[in-house]
Structure formats: C-alpha cells, structure tokens
Amino acid sequence: MVILAVVLFILGYLAIAFEHNLHINKAAPALLTGTICWMLYFLGATDMHVATENLNHSMSDIAGILFFLLGAMTIVELIDSHHGFDVITQKINTRSKSKLLLIIGVLTFFLSAVLDNLTTAIVMSSLCTKLLTDKEDRLWFAGLIIIAANAGGAWTPIGDVTTTMLWIGNQITTGNIMRYTFLPSLVVLIVPMLLMMSKFKGQTIPMVNQEINNDYQSEKKWVLYAGIGMLIFVPIFKTVTHMPPFMGMMMALGFMWVLTSQLHKRKEETLRNKFSLHQALQRIDTPSILFFLGILLAVSSLEQLGILHSLASYLDTTLKNEYIIGTVLGMLSAVIDNVPLVAAAQGMYDLSTYHTDHHFWQFLALTAGTGGSCIIIGSAAGVAIMGLQNINFIWYLKKISWLATAGFFAGIATYILQSKLLGH
C-alpha cells in the first residue's frame, strides 16, 4: 500500500504540474489523489476505528485552513467589487519608469502582506496594464510583481497560504514571523528591483488616462479600510483569545457582511445584489479551495502511512543541516507547488522536533514563499499573471528567473546572518 500510495502521489503531482497540457484543472487530480491515498490507507488498516479517528483529526485541521481561506478570499472580492483598490491605484501619476517600478514593487510587497499574494498580483498587474502601453515594459513589470507579491506574502501569517498553514499549525507565531522574516523578505525584493531599475533609468512613459470608477466614493473607502482592518484583526484575535484563526476570519466576514448590507440597504435591489457578499462568494476561486483540500488530504494520508517521517529521516541523514533542507525545499517550490511542500514538511517534522517559532519553520516560510518566483509556474501569482499578460515561459526563464534567484539567495543569506547576529 505504501509503494502504491507514493506512485499515485507522484502521478497526481505530474497531473497538477502539467494541467495546462492536459487541459484539466489541477483541483481534479488533487482531489482524486487525496481521496484515493486515504482509501489505500483504510484498505491497509487493521483497526477501522483508529483509521476513522485519524481521518477525522486530519479533516479538522484541513477544514480550519479552508474556512480561513474562504473568508479571506470573500473579503478581498468584496473590496474589489466596490472598486476599493482604485483608492490606492489612482494616486500613482509618475512618468519615470524606474520610479514607477519602485512604487509598484513596494506597494505590491506591502499589499500582499495584508491581502494575499495572488490577489495583489492580479490587482497590480491590472494597474500596470492601464499605466503602460509598451508590451515589453508590461512584461518586465509583471515579473517584478510576481517577485514582490511572493516576497510580501512570506513575512505575515495572512499573506501567503503556506505561511498561513504554518501559523494555523502553531509552527510560527505572528510577532516572531514578522520580526525575523521581514528584512530577508524585503531583500528578496530589493535585489531584483534595483537591477531592474538600472535597466529603466532615465526612461519615461506617456501619461495614460486611467478609467477610474468614481461612483460610490464613500462606500469604496469604507469597504477598503474596513476590509484591510478586518484582515489585520485576525492575527490579533488569535493572539488575544488563543482561538483558531478561522474563527477570527469568520467574525471578520460576519462584520463585513453587516457593513455592506447597511451601506446599500437603501439602494435598488439590483445594486444591492451587485455589491452583496452573496455575489462575492460566487466570484471567489472555488477550484483553488478544492485544490488545497485535495492536496492537503493527500499529504495527510502520506503522514499517516509513515512516508513523511521516513523522508524526514532521510533528509536529516543526507543533508544534516536545517538551512540546507529549507533551501532545497524552497528551490523545489519553483517546480512543485509550495502548498504540498509545506504540508509535507509539517508532516515530516512535528513540534517535538522543531518547537513553535524554531528558526527552521521561519526559514521554511521564507524559502517556500519566495522560491516559487524563480520559475513563472512556481507560484499561484506567477501562473495567474502568466495568463493575464500572456508571458512566455522561456522569456521569463531568460529575463526574470536569474533576478528572482539572486533575490532568493540574498534573502537566505540575510536570514542566516540576521539569525547569527541576534542569536536566534
């Protein structure tokens, strides 16, 4: 059963990696892999009661992650449906390409820390489409947005799915992940951004009239500020109450539901429906949530079969260094989706091996979150922008990958040096 589960998992991975060639959404093979791996576990189990308890326990952990993501994605969709992001983007009016690159990079970095890297990448890519007329310029800016979004998402518990998973699993805490990974994450962005800025030095862009929706200015500001405030509230809620993060997210979602209902209660029914939370729920990326469900089910089954523990022992014996292990996992995230990688690491190493806030978990959050930028298909943000801007895989490999890789290793060096200096 163990060998069969490993073979099935590898085949599922290949199907996920080549979803565009197969024309099958990655959620489908993920769900099949997850459910069949658990079926194999049950077929080989000697005690059905214990097997059921293990499945229920795994599903409890997975459900917490899924409800958290559902709430966060719905709040972001509410902001977007109210054109709340226009409040930020309409203030950009520079004509210098290098200065615009700096603004886009920094704005993407901090927005993705509060929202999430995928949503932020899509929003900023759409902004660049409005600001830049030259396609080559848009491609370069899109490359930086991918790097900045992934770097920004790595240093907060709500900025990237993998960091969220580590946070929910109690491998990291809010204050320490921000304290120890902020500077390395910033370096991951700064190195490629400075190199790109030198390329565009002295170049200007023609001013483009942005089509900004000026309707309902008051409502869009209310929803933007309240939405971001509620997302920031979630880690504070967990710290104060010690309740699971998804409870804070559900409270935030309930607040946003009440707020938007009150903002539009006097409007016509068609407008109320347009801005309602019900409509936002219909627009969220449900296949992505099902993908997370499938892949987390698959990884948890491998944990129960003892495969991940054996892999952890092999890595420890072969590499014998936590930083090298974290770096290898980060580099793998450029080829393999970082969600199952981090889930596998959580299964390989429990809290008795590396305690909460151990530097291994923080380092893993950094490498898994930023390593995906090295190849355009290595992150959700990269895949999304690849489709939006029609970026060629080889073009990104030639022009952007080396910049992202330079930033990746600069961030690793910064983290290790910082840890030595702080005695962490």
Image (cartoon, grey):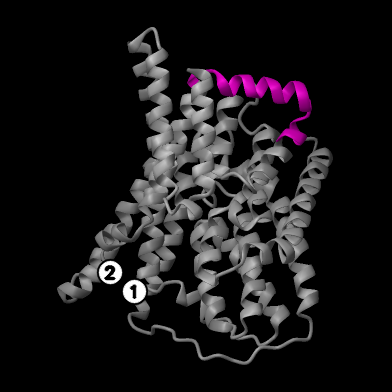
Q: Is residue 230 magenta?
A: no
Disc ID at residue 219: 1
Residue 352, placed above or below residue 414:
above
Instruction: Give the residue displayed 51% in from the left and 91% down from the top.
Output: 209
Dot 2 and dot 1 residues touching (CB under 8 Å): yes
Per the image, label 2 sits on a secondary structure element best described as loop
Confirm whether residue 296 shows in the render: yes
Magenta-highlighted residues: 304-325
Instruction: Give the residue displayed 61% in from the left and 76% down from the top.
Output: 138
Q: How crowded is mark 2: few (under 14 residues within 10 Å), some or many (20 or more)?
A: many
Identified by mark 1, the residue type is Glu
| Location of mark 2 (residue) | 275
Instruction: Give the residue displayed 78% in from the left and 68% down from the top.
Output: 194
Residue 254: x %, y % from top left: 30, 52
Residue 346, placed above or below residue 334:
above
Instruction: Give the residue displayed 38% in from the left and 62% down from the top.
Output: 77
Identified by mark 2, the residue type is Phe
